Every structure is written in C-alpha cells, then in structure tokens.
Amino acid sequence: MNRKKIHVGDARIGMYVDEVCGSWMDHPFWKKAFRISNARILQTLQECGIHEVWIDVSKGLDVGVGADAFTEEDEKLKVDETLRSAITNVRKSERPVELQKELGQARIIHAKAKKEVASMFQEARMGKALQLEQVASLVDEISHSIMRNQCALLSLARLKSKDDYTYLHSVAVCALMIALGRQLGMEGDALRQAGMAGLLHDIGKIMTPEEVLNKPGSLTREEFDIMKQHPRGGWDILRASPGVSEITLDVCLHHHERLDGKGYPMKLSGESISLFARMGAVCDVYDAITSNRCYKSGWEPAEAIRKMAEWKDGNYDESVFHAFVKTVGIYPIGSLVRLESGRLAVVSDQFSGSLLSPKVVVFYSTRHREHLYPEMVELSRSQDAIAAIEKAAEWKFDPAMLQGLVQLSA
Ligand SMILES: [Fe+2]
Ligand SMILES: [Fe+2]
C-alpha cells in the first residue's frame, strides 16, 4: 500500500480512494475504500463538502504533476503537533468521587436516560409537545454524575446497539457537552443548556425513515438529502414545544454546520456559528465515529481523536477542539493500546498522570498470544509506555469485556 493524501479537487477517475477524510455523517461514502470509476462518483466526492482523501497509488492512478500530496509521515507529524498543543495547560479535573463508586450510579442514570429519551422520542413521533421539566431533571442527573467523576458516564457512553443508537447517542452527546462546557469554564445554567442541547440535538431524526437511518450501504444522493433534513425537522419540533431555549434550538439547527461554510442546513461559516453549535459539532462527530453502527464498526476513541485532529481544519473550531481533547484525553478511557513491552492494555483513567501516560489495565500478551491476569499499571510511574493504538475489532475483543476491565481497575 502506498497512501497519499490529496485535495479532492485533484481527484480524478481511475484513482483508488483508500479513505475519505471526514466523518461519515458528512458524506455519502460509508465504504472505507472505493475506486473512482466514473464521473458521477467523482462529482459526488468533489461536491459533498469533503476537503481531502487518502488515495492508494498502488491500486489506482497517482496525482498529476504539480498537485500537492502528503505522505502518512507528514500527516502523523501534523496530528502529533496538534494534539501536543491541545494538551498544554490541562487543568486537573476535580473528581470528588472515585470512578468505581460513581460507575454504579452512572450505570443507573445511563439506563434511566435511555428509557426516558426513547419515550420522549416516541411521544414526539406522535406529535405531542415535549415535557421539558422531565428532560431538565434528566440533564441535571447527568450533569451531577459528570461533576462527581466524568469518566464514569463517559466510559459507558460508547456501548450502543443498533436499536438504541439514536437514544444513547443523544445521552452521550449530552454528557460530552456538559464535560466540554466545564472544560471551557462554563457553570450553572450555561452547563445545563449545553446538556439540554446535546440531549435534543438529533430529535429531528424521528422524521427520518428507518430505511435511510439504518441503511447498511452507501446512501444515494436523494437519501443523503433526506438525512440532511433532520436539523431543520428537529428545529420545527422544538419550536412547537413551549419553553425550549434559544441555545437548544440553535444547536439542533446548526450542529452540522462547518467553519468553512460547507456544512448544512444553512452553510453558516466562521463567527456566524455559535459557540454552543461548535461544541455540538465536535461532541456529535466524536460520539458518532466511536459508536458501532449496523453498517460500520466504530473507531477506537484514541483513533477517533487522531482522525478529528487530522480533519480539524475547516471543520471544527480550534479552541473548542483543543478543549475537547483536554476533556476526553489523547487516550480516552476504554482505548485499547499496545505497550512497548508487547502487552495489550485498556486505558482505565487518563488523568492520573500526564495525558500521554495514563493508567491502564494490562491483560494480553501479543508475544505469547494469550490473556494475562489483569494488572493495573500507572504508566507515569512505569518503564513501559504506549507504543500504538490498537483496534479491538481486529483482535476480536468484545467491547463489553474491555469495559469490564476498566471497571475492574477502578
Ligand atoms: Fe445530527
Ligand atoms: Fe448527532
């Protein structure tokens, strides 16, 4: 494989696209790799709002003379630099409650939130106005759990099944918005608003037909256009419910806008996108790309952070993205990593030392290809260090087993 990153304007028929640089919610190419075999595919690629793609020149045409192309090494250095600058001045997060203690509570809140969001969406589907007091008290419970120990609820947020994806995605974005808001120095009502906006941002998806929402293949242009109606559909629903704040309406309508003006539905750009909508965009993409869907398995959290750093230009507000990296860490809790000793481990707490040397639970030897008795290691006090991010799916590890290891260590 010989990968080069190029601008979509330099793409041409005959090239083999190995990866599209952007969240798969922002373009209709759900497949990881494909050949640009005709003018229609080329046109869709160039018009869907994506800036760059990775091409594999061992499988298709190379770029023409004079076009810019970047190597994997160039990109790795750029991403490393972005992440390094993102984690300067990290405030040690206050955690009045130990992870193990909060996990039990977080699990109860998580299950309750799923049920309440499902019934709220169901009622909205039937045309009923939202019961805002109930939503507000749910947001308060989520917010209190985040205050006690944000790792607990955030570590649960990844586990989703096909059927409960939309509900649990709403809960996850709510929790991420509150954690990110805190990192940005928000308090009180502002935090509540951030959480509420996260919980309701995708309510418009109740109007998206099931076969488009869960289609296990590429969306046609028409289907993608239907999908893109959900921010405005949600805004209509929320506007009809008394008491919904301007911030919630704003995040619902604009969470798919992009700084370069290539988002939807209104192609807002730069300063015209509010801080809350910029926060929503980052939290939304992170949760979506780390979740397993019926058509695609999610990325590892650590991999997702690197991808987002790679795509950041034009997509996200730099300072919001930096705050987000500080919030979830470079190796977010639950990340599968390979250590220099050849052992595999799960990140169980990224704030114990520096963000580059988290607390992990070692559980597998790649040399002997066998499970080890789980052992908690503080990398900041160990000779061992993270060598690489690994993919749980490639090792065929069950996400619930990895989740169990996180809890074990707490
Ligand atoms: Fe959305
Ligand atoms: Fe979303």
Image (cartoon, rainbow, N blue to C red):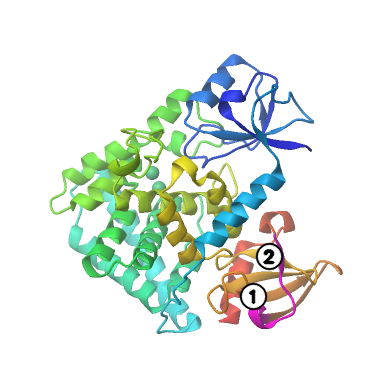
Q: Which mark is residue 232?
A: none
* Label 1: element kind: strand
**Residue furthest out toward the top:** 39
| Residue at mark 1 | 360
Magenta stretch: residue 138 in it? Answer: no
Q: Position of residue 399 (x, y in %)?
A: 61, 62
* Label 2: element kind: strand
Residue at 59% across / 44% down in the picture?
296
Q: Nearer the viewer, residue 401 or 321?
A: 321
Q: Earlier in the sequence, mark 1 or mark 2?
A: 2
Bounds of the magenta span?
376-389
Is residue 291 at least partly visible in the picture? no
Q: Position of residue 338 (x, y in %)?
A: 73, 65
The answer to whether mark 1 and mark 2 are in CB contact below 8 A is: yes
Cα–Cα gap, marks 1 and 2? 9 Å
Q: Nearer the viewer, residue 277 or 131?
A: 277
Q: Residues within 10 Å of mark 2 (few under 14, many from 20)?
A: many
Looking at the rendering, the quadrant in which ligand 1 lies is top left
Residue 303, above or below 250: below
**Residue furthest out toward the right:** 368
Magenta stretch: residue 383 in it? Answer: yes
Is residue 239 at least partly visible in the picture? yes
Asked if residue 38 lies left or right of residue 199, the reply is: right
The amino acid type of the residue labelled 1 equals Val
Q: Which mark is residue 337?
A: 2
Asked if residue 306 lies left or right of residue 123, the reply is: right
